[in-house]
Every structure is written in structure tokens, then in C-alpha cells.
Amino acid sequence: MGSGDFHEASVWIAFDDTDDYEQGCTTFVMYNFIKEFLKTRSEDRILGLPRLIRLNPYIPFKTRGNAAVALKVKVEDPRELLELGVTVVDEFSARGAKTSPGIVVSTTSSERWFYYSALSDVVPKELAERLITKIGAIRWGGRGVIGSLAAIMAELEDSTFELLSYRDGEERPIIDSDILARLSELTEPFTFANMDGKRPLIEPSTDDPVLFGVRGDSAYHVMYVGNTLLFLLGAKPRWLLYETNQGTGANFSIVGKRMYQPSIASGRVTSINRSGEGHVFMHVGGDEVVVYRHTGMAGLIGQYAIVAGGRRPGLIGNPIYAETLFSIDETVKIRNPRCPRCGAAMKSMGKGELRCDRCGFKSYLPRIVEGQYGFREGVPKMGERRHLAKLPERVGLEGLSKIFVMPRRWISW
Ligand code: ATP
């Protein structure tokens, strides 16, 4: 029981769709929400890091990375939490034609199926609303309730961290790529996706309040890079650490064949055609696949390939727009065995019979199959990968995030 007449409960609050194409950022709403929350409440009421959850990357009406945010707190009255959420959204969201903010407050996070649906399909708003009613949650706003509910129900068996730092109206300082490259080298593989070759990847391209975001599998390495950069830039440390599903490949947890679903095609490559714009259209095991900017596809005809991507409307049907491609390159040679009597070459006589050229020995020996198998992986350049894409750099680090207890310092303003 809490100190007053109310029963204290653990409650989730989540936000989505608070930004427009060029402005705003849902994570900034969460940052300000936490600041407001902590003005009147102690930090031990925050139960775990806020979550930054990326949802189906292929849905058409996302503004950029299809992100929603959620936080678990201890409160006496969930309605007060929702009220505080509405005040913060009113003040900090960037309203534009497409913005349709939504907030959900729920005491349960166990409807995991809803998260997986929002990762792998297009979810109607009515479905979210029905579930909200069923579980006794409360909501406010528009289409954003879909992503908010999904962020609460997210299952993070594997997760990563992102430190997001914010600016407060000031100009965006220029991040020195040599310094970032050095910090990146020092902290790899515990931070990732800092650079694409020589180009920094941590800054947003739009005019939103994010200064930069540092991603990684170790909360402490991410904070080290973030704070060092802020110090070198002379910027005020305003940041928030998130637990995320980024870089985990969660978008391929469930695959399907419908429009806007993550999909996998596998089988022999039967045709490859290049468009004028440099795209490649392929048939893989009966599926139409579109590959951007990949080269070296020519040798793939007849080979076995596995392609993962998302289904979008195409000129014909709903092709898979590839993100990752694996192929098994096989070259098979069949030759006759050597003569077991004298070691010379043997000639085929037809119907499987072999005859030694030198000593005349005849036999039905099996022929020798020599295969050479190569494995080819085609992944986009770092800068072209989706937020959710499983990074090859992370293989072996899955679940590492779970060994960290919540760092003592996880927000700064
Ligand atoms: P940013 O990355 O800058 O936060 P965004 O790309 O996340 O922007 P939003 O503004 O969040 O875009 O808009 C996405 C909208 O789509 C939200 O209203 C969210 O509720 C909704 N949405 C997310 N996933 C699904 C889904 N699988 N099915 C239907 N609607 C979805």
C-alpha cells in the first residue's frame, strides 16, 4: 500500500506519433515527460529504463523510423499519469498534417502478440482500442495508440541501448568524424552503427531536437561515447538512455506474404533483370524480389538464395524489397575415378561403365562429385540499414544488455 489511501501500482505509459516528417521526435516527448514526472516524484518510482521500440518498418504512414516509446513507473493513480502525459504531448509534440499522437496507460504488458502483430503487419486502430478496453487500460488521442500499445507489450529478450542527446533550440554543432571514428574504434563491438565508412551516422538528417544518438550493446560504452562527445562539443549534457529493440532483427520474428509484411523468399534464382535506375529485379523460388544498389547479382542465376525484406506494392504483385541476401554459390564438377589397378585415367564407355586407358581394366565404379561451395552475404551499407536490422557486428552479443543492472545515471538535463 502507498502512503495515502491509494494502492500503488506499476503502470506503463507509452507515446507515439507526436512528430511530423521534418520536425519533432517522439523520444523528446518521453525525455520531457520524465523530467516533468521527476519534478514532483522521486527517481525510485521509475522502474527500469524507458523503451524505444521500432515497429513494422514497411508500413506506409510512418514518418521515419516507426518508433514508439514506453516507460514503467510506480504511481497511485494511472489517470494522473495520463493527464501528465497529455500536458507534455501538448507542449512538446510537433503537430503537422500527418501527426496523430496517442498515449496508452496500462498495468499489464503481457499481451505480447500485439507487439508481434505491430512488428509484422498493419494493425487496425480498432484492434488496439478493443485490446485497451479488454485489459482495462486507458488511452488518449489518435492513431498513435497503436504504436503506444505495441511498445508496452514489447518483448525484449534481446535488446540494445541508445543514448539520445537533445538540444534546446541551439544550432546543431558539427561532429568531428575523426574523433567519432576514434571513439567508435575504442568501443567496438559494444557500440555500433556510429559511422558509415567516414560518414558519421549518429546525427539525424531532419530538423528535430535530437543532437545525436549512440547505439550499442553496453549501456556504459554508449554513455562513455555520448558524454565524451558532448564534452568535446561543449554542449550541455541533456540526454536519456533507452533500452531498444534496434539492431536485433526483431522485424523478422514473424514473416508473411501480405502487403507491408516482413517476408523471406528462398529458392533458386531463376531470372535477374536490371532496371534503368540500377535496381535489380529477381525471381527467387517463385517470389518477385527487388534489390537496390546491390552489385554482383549476375552470377546468381541458378543458385540457391535466401532474401529477407518487406513487401510493398509493385508494378506487378507485391514484391519483396530486399534488405539482406544470402546465397550459396555452388560449382559442381563430376569426374571419373583413377584406375584402381594402375592409377591411370579411366574413360566412360556409356551406361556407367568405365575403362582404363592404359591397362584396359573395366568397371562400374561410381563417378566422383567435387563440389565447391561458397557463401555470399549481401547486406546494405551501414547507412542504408534499417533500425531493426540484425547487425552482423552483433552476432554473439545477443542478450548482453540483460547483464547490466539499470545504471545509476541514465538521464541528464
Ligand atoms: P519517428 O521515428 O520520427 O518517431 P515514426 O516513423 O515513428 O516517426 P510515427 O510518427 O510514430 O512515425 O507514426 C507511425 C504511426 O503508425 C503511429 O501512429 C503508430 O501508432 C502507427 N503504427 C505503427 N506501427 C503500426 C502497425 N504495425 N500497424 C498500424 N499502425 C502502426
Image (tube, rainbow, N blue to C red):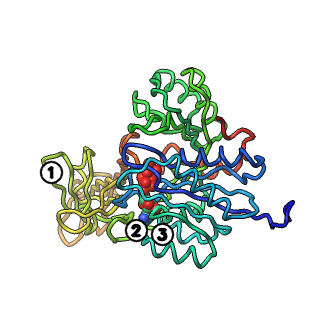
Label 1 – label 3 distance at C-alpha: 34 Å
Tell me if 51 is positioned left or right of 405 in this view: left
The answer to the question of whether label 1 and label 2 lie on touching residues, with beta carbons closer than 8 A, is: no
Tell me if 167 is positioned left or right of 227 in this view: left
Please say if 123 is above or below 290.
Answer: below
Label 3 – label 2 distance at C-alpha: 7 Å
Residue drawn where x is 55% and y is 26% of the image: 183
Q: Is residue 395 visible?
A: yes
Tell me if 18 is positioned left or right of 263 in this view: right
Image depth: mark 1 or mark 3 in front: 3
Q: Which residue is mark 1?
A: 275
Q: Earlier in the sequence, mark 1 or mark 2?
A: 2
Q: How many marks?
A: 3
The answer to the question of whether label 3 and label 2 lie on touching residues, with beta carbons closer than 8 A, is: no
Residue 321, x across and y down, in percent: 30, 57
The answer to the question of whether label 1 and label 3 lie on touching residues, with beta carbons closer than 8 A, is: no
What amino acid is labelled 1 in the image?
A: Ser
Residue 387, x across and y down, in percent: 45, 49
Please rate how many residues cluster around mark 1, counting C-alpha atoms within 10 Å: few if below 14, some from 14 to 19, many from 20: few
What amino acid is labelled 2 in the image?
A: Val
Image depth: mark 1 or mark 2 in front: 2
Residue 296, x across and y down, in percent: 25, 45
Q: Which residue is mark 3?
A: 117
Q: Look at the numbered disc 3 and say if its residue's Cβ is closer than 8 Å to ligand 1.
A: yes
